[in-house]
Image: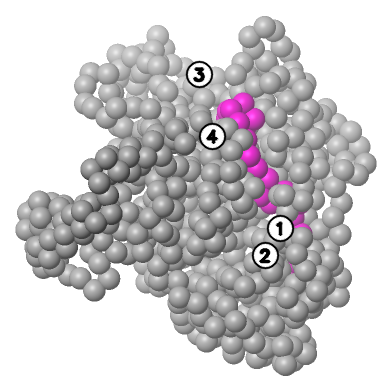
Amino acid sequence: MDHPDIPITASSRLRTHIDLMAAQAVEVAPDASSRHLHNGLDTLLPPADLHGSYTNNRPLPTKGIADRHAYIVGSGIGGLTAAFFLIRDGHMPGENITILESQQIEGGALDGAGNAEDGYVVRGGREMEMTYQNFWDVFSEIPALELPKPFTVLDEFRIVNDADKNLSKARLLEKQGQIRDSSIMGLSKLQQLELVRLFLARKEDLDDVTVEDWFSEGFLNSNFYMFWCTMFAFQKWHSVLEMKLYMHRFLHLMDGLNDMTALVFPKYNQYDSFIVPLMAWLKDRGVKIQYDTVVSDVEMDSDVETRTTTAIQCHTGSGEKTITVGAKDLVFVTIGSIVEDTAFGDNDTAPKLRVNVPDPGVGASWRLWKNLARKSPAFGRPDKFCGDVPRSTWESATLTCKPSPLMDKLKELSVNDPYSGKTVTGGIVTITDSAWLMSFTINRQPHFLDQPDDVIVPWVYALLMDQPGDYVRKPMPDCTGSEILTELCFHLGLIDQVDEVIAATKVRTALMPYITAQFMPRARGDRPWAVPEGSTNLACLGQFVETHNDVVFTLESSVRTARIGVYSLLGLKKQVPDIHPGQYDIRRLLRATRTLNNDEAFLGEGLLRRLLGGTYLENILPLGPDEDTADLRKNGLFDQQISALRGMIEESHTLESAKTWAQGVIDNLRGRR
């Protein structure tokens, strides 16, 4: 058959293979965790989680693509990258794509605004790492913010991070600014077993189970969980399924959890670093964006098996509007929003939430999702995520600081001088004895393109919203910016100098009612797939979309949903890579096991050293803090562990009790208790 969108001169000698490709079924979003790795005639494509340069191919265009249009609801990273994939891989003309944005600016949660006089503001930041296959694929083609062509955002990012490795020297604080030891995870053997049991549990067995349902109180008070909950913004009432997915997704980063060496960060705030260059690329190709456009509903023609979107209902500054959607046109909807209905405050005012009020702009993305869910169960259950605001809320504060005692103290806690342009705190610093569980960070400075040389912009947030402060005896949401700054100064031992600090600091606060809504306990069917069952021309984007193995609250997850939606609706013969396979790498598993064992040798490590030390495979063995490769060839550890095991059996157990103990461990691993 002919392919009208490929010139015959270019395709004539490939006709046989083009026709074969058109007939080939390609699973766009494969699940690597359900496959048994092998080579054979049935494995035409690379393994789903082992994608590399071989998969950087352009798929052939879909028939009639030049005559189709796409409407994208929401201009967050998911919406913008949907437009990118439509153009690059879908071959859709950019002028055929329209983005509908409810605000006056694009970017969604990737924001960054303000100035040095009134104060800068970022609602949140994104901790990033190297295996974001979909995200880095996009930005390997977007022109750099500052370097000349042909350099890309990825090129610029690598220069910054390769030359300036991230590191934290004060991950945990206590007792008015004293650094607390964060060198080990602080897990007992039984608490380590709780983690192992979760790692081995099936995803389908964890519906609606919370973190506190699964773990003991001792585990929740460990260094490990302090690192975990503050770095990822987990609450103990959140989904343990999501915690499990995080364990698998980031297992290869476990030994960088306590000092943040596993992370990479952009030079500037996320809006300037990513949204500005991506928007420039899209606009250069003719993509249109309509601001001040709140999408309230979509109309669909439905039968028993399919649903086809026919119109989009909008509320605009000039009144109500209906956009007609053709059967071959595409619609991409960002469902839910983690930053919607943010309330802002400053030095003198506390933020005031507006939720569930009769205003078209309040809760718009949640209302749209609810309207979709009423049309079919395939669109999920949004109330599971937005129905308990107190449990999905936290607050952040952006500080715009001139020199003061606060900056002197933060310099003490930083890896480099904040004014040096290099890594500063290397990620968040958590105040462990704060009633609010307050954390702060200073990224590389300047954080904004127009930031004066004598200004530093730290960012502060807290997890616990219902507790009075330790000095300011009010919950954080009830506080003005100056009161939040006072509480921070108290915990840094600066309360006697707080007036001087306040005089030199502008504070902009952001109280977000849905910021951790994506972590709320959930079950199968609560989130829609990127292309809900039966949908012929509509896909869902963002943090509330189901994927096989990826996590939420990352740039990568939003980009993944966009890519799956584009490839699926256009029928492109190309796969979206599954998550990085670090969870299956024996080197990473052994390293993580030692890290969780407080960086001490785990049971059986001596035997592994006896077997592999001095062989080609000795590089898979983890080294201790003060060890080098030569130590792997010594028998001391093996002999110590054998003696310890023999003593445990002889002194503490009869043969029968040892069997009982072993069976208990097996039962725990199988989840029978």
Whether residue 628 is in magenta: the answer is no
- The quarter of the displayed image where residue 566 is located: top right
Residue annotated with mark 4? 206
| Left/right of residue 99 with respect to residue 23 in the rendered view | right
The dot on residue 267 is none
Q: Are marks 4 and 2 in contact (CB under 8 Å)?
A: no
Return the x and y of residue 501 as percentages of the image width and height: 72, 87
**Which secondary structure, mark 4?**
loop
Of the numbered discs 1 and 4, the one sitting upstream in the chain is: 4
- Gap between marks 4 and 2, in whole Å? 28 Å
Say what amino acid the circle numbered 1 marks: Trp
The boundaries of the magenta stretch are 506-530
Residue annotated with mark 1? 394
Say what amino acid the circle numbered 2 marks: Ala
Q: In this view, does 280 lie above or below 532?
A: below
- Gap between marks 1 and 3, in whole Å? 47 Å
